[in-house]
């Protein structure tokens, strides 16, 4: 007997921290820039950057170092960081996909459920291509398509729109607090991937996809 509370019609995935762990490459690129500007940037500080747009990350970085930049410096550092980041992700491949993500994607494909991406990254598409997952996605909404960053729901609402599904019929997988807030604000079912204490506003919590059973997925669809 179907649980009529759910019957979800589309699933939207965040990228960094959900499908792949690109946070470590973002960290290396931001650290390189920080060191070049004469200060240290720690892994703990990098936590603040998860799910946050590139522009906002640089603003936070400069705040940490109490550096006042001209618009010209700011723009140049944004470009430099991204050039370095692209070098770090150049050789990414399928081995970097987080555990059991392909199993859940395949489950959705097998059940003909539309799949979307909702990421803050402007590099989302090439990353999905490198790791060989691009063909799973029916809609990709990323940092190139939105004007408002998470926790604004724009990215997920746009993805639902592209998938042709009502917001309340969508499920979102997210690893960032701002992403969970965005999913909740969009009136979607939010699933936190990571530390349940940090992602306490999520409707469901899992440490990673290995904890997501087929029974659970069956209950949702
Ligand atoms: P880019 P997500 C986010 O990806 C990252 O978590 C965040 O650290 C990064 O600053 C942001 O993408 C922008 O990335 O510089 O590639 O445009 O978690 O929203 O998939
Ligand atoms: Mg993320």
Image (cartoon, grey):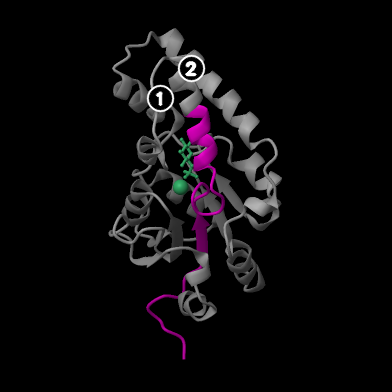
Q: Which residue is mark 2?
A: 77
Q: At 66% across and 72% down in the image, what residue appears? A: 110
Instruction: Determine whether label 2 and label 1 are within 8 Å by CB.
Output: yes
- Queried whether the magenta region covers residue 6, the answer comes back as yes
Magenta highlight: main SS: loop
Query: Where does residue 10 sit, x and y in percent of width and height?
Result: 52, 63
Q: Note whether ligand 1 is within 8 Å of mark 2.
A: no
Query: Where does residue 186 sit, x and y in percent of width and height?
Result: 36, 54
Q: Secondary structure at mark 2?
A: helix
Q: Is residue 171 above or below residue 221?
A: above
Q: At 40% across and 37% down in the image, what residue appears? A: 46
Q: Is residue 218 above or below residue 210?
A: below
| Residue 115 image-quadrant placement | bottom right
> Which of 28 and 53 lies nearest the eye of the viewer?
28
Q: Which residue is mark 1?
A: 58
Q: Which mark is residue 162?
A: none
Around disc 2, counting alpha carbons within 10 Å, would you say few (fewer than 14), some (14 to 19), or many (20 or more)?
A: some
Q: At 51% across and 76% down in the image, what residue appears? A: 213
Query: Where does residue 55 sit, x and y in percent of width and height?
Result: 42, 26
- Queried whether the magenta region covers residue 53, the answer comes back as no
Magenta stretch: give its range: 1-30
| Residue 79 image-quadrant placement | top right
Disc 2 from disc 1: Cα separation:
8 Å
First reached walking from the N terminus: tag 2 or tag 1: 1
Q: Is residue 11 above or below residue 95?
A: below
Q: At 45% across and 30% down in the image, what residue appears? A: 54
**Left or right of residue 113, residue 216 in this image:** left
> Which of 121 and 4 lies nearest the eye of the viewer?
121
């Amino acid at each position: 007997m179907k649980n009529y509370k759910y019957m979800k019609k589309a699933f939207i995935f965040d990228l960094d921290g959900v499908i792949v762990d690109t946070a470590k490459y973002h960290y290396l690129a931001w650290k390189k820039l920080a060191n070049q500007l004469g200060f240290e940037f720690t892994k703990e500080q990098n936590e603040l950057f998860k799910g946050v747009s590139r522009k906002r990350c640089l603003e936070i970085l400069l705040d940490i170092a109490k550096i006042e930049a001209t618009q010209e410096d700011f723009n140049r550092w944004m470009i430099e960081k991204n050039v370095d980041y692209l070098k770090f992700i150049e050789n990414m491949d399928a081995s970097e996909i987080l555990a059991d993500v392909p199993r859940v994607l395949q489950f959705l494909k097998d059940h003909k459920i539309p799949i979307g991406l909702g990421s803050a990254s402007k590099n989302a598409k090439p990353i999905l291509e490198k790791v060989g997952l691009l063909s799973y996605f029916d809609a990709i909404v990323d940092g190139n398509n939105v004007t408002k960053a998470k926790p604004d729901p724009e990215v997920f609402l746009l993805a639902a729109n592209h998938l042709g599904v009502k917001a309340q019929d969508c499920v979102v997988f997210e690893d960032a607090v701002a992403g969970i807030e965005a999913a909740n604000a969009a009136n979607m079912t939010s699933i936190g991937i990571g530390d349940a204490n940090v992602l306490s506003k999520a409707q469901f919590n899992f440490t990673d996809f290995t904890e997501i059973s087929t029974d659970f997925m069956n209950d949702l669809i």
